[in-house]
Image (cartoon, rainbow, N blue to C red):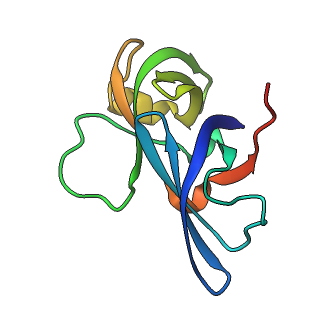
Amino acid sequence: MNRIRAVVSGIENNGNLHRISLSAGKHDFTVITLELADEYAVGARVDIRFKPAHVALAKHIAGDISIANRIEAEVREIRQGNILAELLLGSETGDFYALTTVEAVGRMRIVQGDRVIALLKASDLYLSKTDKA
């Protein structure tokens, strides 16, 4: 599970639906959740967690898209299997992994050292207490 350290900067709610705004250095993130514990108040230090399979990748992105959570990253390593490829990405928010198909890596001509945009849907992100480590 990937992890980005962040601080809660805002919370909006409508019934059980919550939109949490977070700041991680120069990056702002949004998380959408149905449940929110009281410990996640504005100013709380948290970890944003997400699965490598929930990271979509883009190169030379143009036009409007609905995904607001975007991280510019460098491809540091590519490990290819028969069907899936695991990419280690490095960014200002830290290193994290993306899992995609070998076909997508080939079609997009992704190689080590490339710059990509990691796209993270707000509903695919989870919050957890910072473990201080």
- Left or right: 126, with 7 as reference point: right
- Of all residues, the one furthest to the left in this rendering is 63
- Left or right: 44, with 27 as reference point: right
Q: Quadrant of the C terminus?
A: top right
Residue shown at the point (68%, 53%) measured from the top left? 126
Determine if residue 112 is in view: yes
Horizontal and vertical percent position of residue 64: 22, 58
**Of residues 127 and 103, which is closer to you in this image?**
127
- Of all residues, the one furthest to the bottom in this rendering is 15
Q: Quadrant of the N terminus?
A: top right
> Quadrant of the rendered structure where residue 47 is?
top right
**Of residues 84 and 90, which is closer to you in this image?**
90
**Does residue 15 lie above or below 32 as drawn?**
below
> Quadrant of the rendered structure where residue 92 is?
top left
Residue shown at the point (39%, 57%) measured from the top left? 67
Horizontal and vertical percent position of residue 95: 57, 23
Total tally of numbered discs in the picture: 0
**Does residue 31 lie above or below 103 as drawn?**
below
**Does residue 107 lie above or below 18 as drawn?**
above
